[in-house]
Image (cartoon, rainbow, N blue to C red):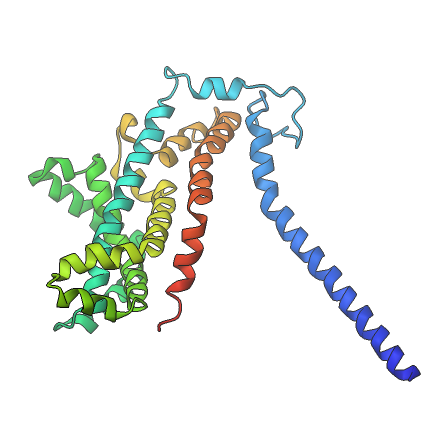
């Protein structure tokens, strides 16, 4: 009896220490993730505009960095934000439409080259767009000779490039989600004379809203923060995206403006946080429902 009590106390002690260590690890990870955010918030309110003497709590906090940020004479910050929203939202909507059509075709239709197409899409994703930078630049340059609004230094051309790199994974996600939708629903509608396009619009799409929200959100995040392709394909100051435009604050060797850069970073992350908060239920459903095929 005594040995059983000692064993029970030992197990309870081990369980308590395991819980303590887990809590310590969790809070260390949380602090590690939050520290850069807190540092950026602190720098945005520091009028010294320097990173050398930056403190976690600024000595004389003010809104001077935010006032300079919205000064149109120094930099077109609002124009950069508008460009980023236009490109990210437009590209995300187009990707949702195209991946819906492609995912439905791969999920419900049987045609020659279907398996090769699916494998080809996933194999293409193994090679990042950065490896094809020179080829992409030449293709967009050549395309601009015949279709000017799709050439270099155009938002439409940049959106076209982004769409090419977004098809693989998104088509696979939508296809796997469509596979979980019972075919009996479509068979019933087909008996009433519904066409494949009507099946997609009135049956599949309403049931697949969660995965479409996931595709839209992930694509929006990727495009909103993308830098390299936008830096190469866009040259005019009034056509730059937010990620490229912010580089001008810290690109000058003797005139780095870290305070203004931090203020701009703080403002630019608000739309992403708001979008995530609004779509969090659909994101969880979309990411988990298509993980297991019925």
- Looking at the image, residue 156 lies above or below residue 285: above
Judge whether residue 101 can be spotted in this image: no
Outermost right residue: 2
Q: Quadrant of the N terminus?
A: bottom right
Where on the picture, by quarter, is residue 5? bottom right
Q: Residue at x 12, y 44 (%)?
A: 142
Q: Position of residue 275 (x, y in %)?
A: 42, 41
Q: Position of residue 236 (x, y in %)?
A: 26, 28
Q: Residue at x 39, y 63 (%)?
A: 289
Outermost top residue: 73
Q: Position of residue 274 (x, y in %)?
A: 45, 38
Which sits in the foreground, 246 or 190? Answer: 190
Q: Position of residue 11 (x, y in %)?
A: 80, 74
In the picture provided, is 128 more to the left or to the right than 136?
Answer: right
Where on the picture, by quarter, is residue 202? bottom left
Q: Quadrant of the C terminus?
A: bottom left
Q: Residue at x 56, y 34 (%)?
A: 40
Q: Residue at x 39, y 58 (%)?
A: 286
- Looking at the image, residue 274 lies above or below residue 60: below
Outermost left residue: 146
- Looking at the image, residue 9 lies above or below residue 100: below
- How many discs mark residues in the rendered view? 0
Judge whether residue 114 can be spotted in this image: yes
């Amino acid at each position: 009896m005594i040995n059983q009590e000692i064993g029970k106390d030992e197990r309870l002690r081990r369980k308590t220490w395991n819980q303590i260590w887990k809590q310590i690890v969790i809070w260390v990870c949380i602090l590690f993730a939050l520290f850069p955010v807190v540092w950026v918030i602190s720098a945005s309110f520091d009028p010294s505009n320097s990173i050398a003497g930056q403190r976690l709590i600024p000595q004389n906090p003010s809104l001077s960095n935010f006032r300079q940020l919205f000064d149109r004479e120094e930099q077109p910050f609002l124009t950069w934000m508008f460009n980023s929203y236009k490109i990210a939202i437009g590209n995300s909507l187009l990707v949702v439409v195209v991946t819906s059509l492609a995912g439905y075709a791969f999920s419900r239709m049987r045609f020659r080259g279907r398996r090769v197409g699916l494998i080809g899409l996933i194999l293409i994703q193994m090679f990042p767009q950065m490896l094809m930078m020179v080829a992409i630049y030449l293709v967009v340059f050549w395309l601009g000779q015949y279709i000017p609004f799709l050439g270099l230094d155009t938002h439409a051309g940049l959106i076209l490039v982004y769409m090419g790199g977004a098809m693989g994974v998104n088509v696979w996600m939508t296809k796997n989600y469509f596979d979980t939708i019972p075919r009996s629903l479509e068979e019933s509608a087909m008996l009433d004379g519904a066409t494949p396009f009507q099946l997609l619009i009135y049956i599949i799409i309403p049931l697949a809203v969660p995965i479409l929200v996931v595709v839209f959100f992930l694509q929006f995040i990727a495009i909103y923060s993308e830098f390299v392709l936008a830096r190469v394909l866009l040259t005019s100051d009034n056509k730059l995206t937010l990620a490229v435009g912010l580089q001008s604050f810290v690109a000058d060797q003797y005139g780095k403006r870290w305070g203004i850069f931090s203020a701009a970073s703080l403002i630019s992350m608000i739309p992403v946080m708001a979008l995530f908060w609004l779509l969090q239920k659909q994101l969880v459903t979309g990411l988990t429902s298509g993980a297991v095929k019925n």
